[in-house]
Amino acid sequence: MGIFPWAMVLLAQAQTSQQWTFVTAQGELSRVRYAFEAHTRVRLAPQPLLFTALQLSPSVGVNLQGDVSLWAAYSRFEPLDGGRPSENRLWQQVLFDRDTDRLRFVMRARVEERFFVTMLSPAVRLRFLVRGSAPLPLKTLRVLAQNETFIHVLGAGDVVASGFDQNRLQASLQWRPAPWVTLELGYMLQVPGSLVLSHNVITSVTFRLPKWNPFEEGEERRDLPLPQG
């Protein structure tokens, strides 16, 4: 998994650029977490300012002991560029999220069942993510780096094939101007199996809804590490 995606960068035959935007609302109720996310993609080059996709994703999770939580969700993915058919997606994931004095470390393993409207049986995809972030001297700012690899263990006809799907490497700057909102600006190198590289600009706004149970004194409220797309 390590060398293979980067070998594909050298073999890339074409490149494109997109703007990915995420707007997320997150909340907690005791040990239960929930989130709703809207995600859009706009092609910047070639054929600039063309909307290519829209995705809506409600999700719910439960905290286990320690730094582990379990999640389940539904996503509706609508391609807007005449590419793949519309998709209804179910996913389940286990999330490990730990803070140290200086770093926040996240690992995530997700299973997706991808139901394309033109196919009777779903494709099954695995996603593996590793993320690290650290605060800057200005406490409202953080730097973030992450990598996520996608592998189809079960294809769906001629829509998607089994095997390596894509790799996403991302670096971002996060700004938290208020306790209830976080803004993010970043760059993502997307390496798909089609050998068409995508250089993506990432913008994100995350809102934290009021928690029904008050926080214990001294507990810091954090964003839920749930990147979608």
Image: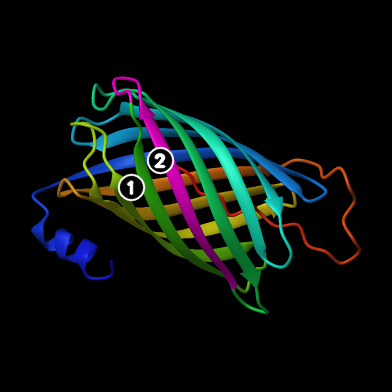
Decide if residue 163 is in sight here: yes
Quadrant into which the C terminus falls:
top left
| Residue segment shown in magenta | 104-120
| Residue 176 vertical placement versus 40 (above, below) | below
Quarter of the figure with residue 94:
bottom right
Residue type (three-letter) at the residue carrying disc 1: Asn
* Of residues 87 and 155, the one drawn nearer to the viewer in this rendering: 155
Classify 10 Å Cα crowding around label 1: few (below 14), some (14-19), many (20 and above): many
Q: Is residue 133 magenta?
A: no
Q: Quadrant of residue 19?
A: top left
Q: Where is residue 179 in the image (x, y as percent from the top left)?
A: 75, 52
Mark 2 or mark 1: whose residue is earlier in sequence? 2
Q: Name the residue under label 2.
A: 20
Task: Please report contact status of discs 2 and 1: CB closer than 8 Å, yes or no.
Answer: yes
The total number of labels drawn is 2
Residue at image position (37%, 54%) is 187
Q: Can you give x and y, in whole percent of width and height, for residue 184 in the image?
A: 53, 51
Residue at the spot of label 1: 200
